[in-house]
Amino acid sequence: MTENATTDTAPKGDLFSKFDDIIQTRETLLASGVEDPYNLVMEKVLSPTRAICNGRDTILLGTYNYMGMTFDPDVLDAGKQALADYGSGTTGSRVLNGTFQGHKECEDALKEFYGMDHAMVFSTGYQANLGIISTIAGKGDYVILDIDSHASIYDGCAMGNAEIVPFRHNDIEALEKRLRRIPEGAGKLVILEGVYSMMGDVAPLKEMIAISKKYGAMVLVDEAHSMGFIGENGRGVAEEQGVMDDCDFIIGTFSKSVGTVGGFCVSNHPKFEIMRLVCRPYVFTASLPPSVVATSATSIRKLMHGSNKRAHLWENSKVLHKGLRDLGFELGTPEAQSAIIAVIMPDLQQGAMMWEALLKEGLYVNLARPPATPAGMTLLRCSLCAEHSAEEVQTILAMFERAGKAVGIIS
Ligand SMILES: Cc1ncc(COP(=O)(O)O)c(C=O)c1O
């Protein structure tokens, strides 16, 4: 047992004792006097890029609000109208009383956005992964996944009880090696993400999907961090790399570019609709409120015509990436590959100090730490928005420069 006050006073058999290490790390961090990076309250949200935090006007650079749809007037109007016409909630599951006209319209918007035959909306992206993966990959099947996959992907595998076969991050040869070893005739699902959310790097989907198909595997691609932004029509990395037709399932979320909440799966599989009866995280939970599906559908339809915004977001991402690199920060990718720019911190303590120094400057970013991050890294994760102006990006760089010098991370 570790020697700290928390464990010494814990009663025997306390089921919370398994959290002692994380409690201790957190207490040590807060005892050093830094503000709690996981307890920030936004007292008022002014726009997709600004909020009042601790009484101060703050630039938001850690919200995943890539396309800045949260205050779009058409989106807001659609939500208000649906609230008036359909009430505040569905009070039920999609299978019973929980499918309203708005859910159908949202699924129609998704089918059109992706050009796919089927679309199924879930209450969150987490539930979409949990539901689809656990339902299609069961006991005796194999799920071959990138080791840096999102928690919802791992949880879906655990719930379905399939054999989990992880491979090294973005390593094409490692994927093939794993696939080669799986018994012939076994059910195989390869799971990839378009953009990996911690480092903001893009997967070599083209090569990886070709290999997966060579070994007879089905492929699921999670485009949570690329939908709306990457690809000519904002369909994601699979569109960008020309492999949309080879994806058996695309999973996404409304909580990032769409600017609301919810998750979905689109597919061309002819038997896909059976999922509505057999997928437990779809069947046994209440559906999204009418206002949410109405705002989501409006946002998705507007994203189809978002090429100017996409171009501006690319410009912002490239300028911020180059600016941070020129200042001497160590970054997660050699060039901007997405709207996520990960700034690598020397350790958690200095990362928390830098996070706090930026907040005092009036800039909000995410402090990410293990186990969410790969290789035990502490990251300051920046996610850009299409509504950040070019001037704001310069202001952000000046804030990073002052904070980085004050904390001693750059000279
Ligand atoms: C890759 C990935 N998949 C799924 C999700 C879950 O999305 P949601 O926030 O809608 O639950 C996330 C959320 O961060 C994610 O990063």
Image (tube, rainbow, N blue to C red):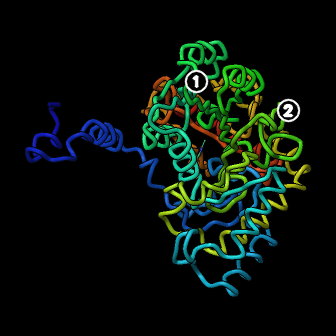
Can residue 205 be spotted in the picture? yes
The residue at which mark 1 appears reads as 185
Q: Which mark is residue 167?
A: none
Q: Earlier in the sequence, mark 2 or mark 1?
A: 1
Q: Secondary structure at mark 2?
A: loop
Question: Residues under labels 2 and 1: Cα distance?
Answer: 28 Å
Image position of 157 with respect to 50: above or below: above
Q: Front-most of 243 and 134?
A: 134
**Which amino acid type is shown beneath numbered disc 1?**
Gly
**Residue drawn at 66 percent across, 76 percent down:** 100
* 360 left or right of 306 in image: left
Total numbered badges shown on the rendered structure: 2
Q: Nearer the viewer, mark 2 or mark 1?
A: 1
**Residue drawn at 56 percent across, 69 percent down:** 95
Task: Determine the image quadrant of residue 381.
Answer: top right
| Quarter of the rendering occupied by the C terminus | top right
**Label 1 neighbourhood size at 10 Å, few (<14), some (14-19), many (20+)?**
few
**Which amino acid type is shown beneath numbered disc 2?**
Gly
Residue contact between numbered discs 2 and 1, judged by CB atoms under 8 Å: no
Q: Secondary structure at mark 1?
A: loop
Can residue 60 be spotted in the picture? no
Q: Front-most of 411 and 342?
A: 342
Q: Front-most of 364 and 105?
A: 105
The residue at which mark 2 appears reads as 242
Residue 21, position in %: x, y?
27, 35
**Label 2 neighbourhood size at 10 Å, few (<14), some (14-19), many (20+)?**
few
Q: Front-most of 144 and 167?
A: 144
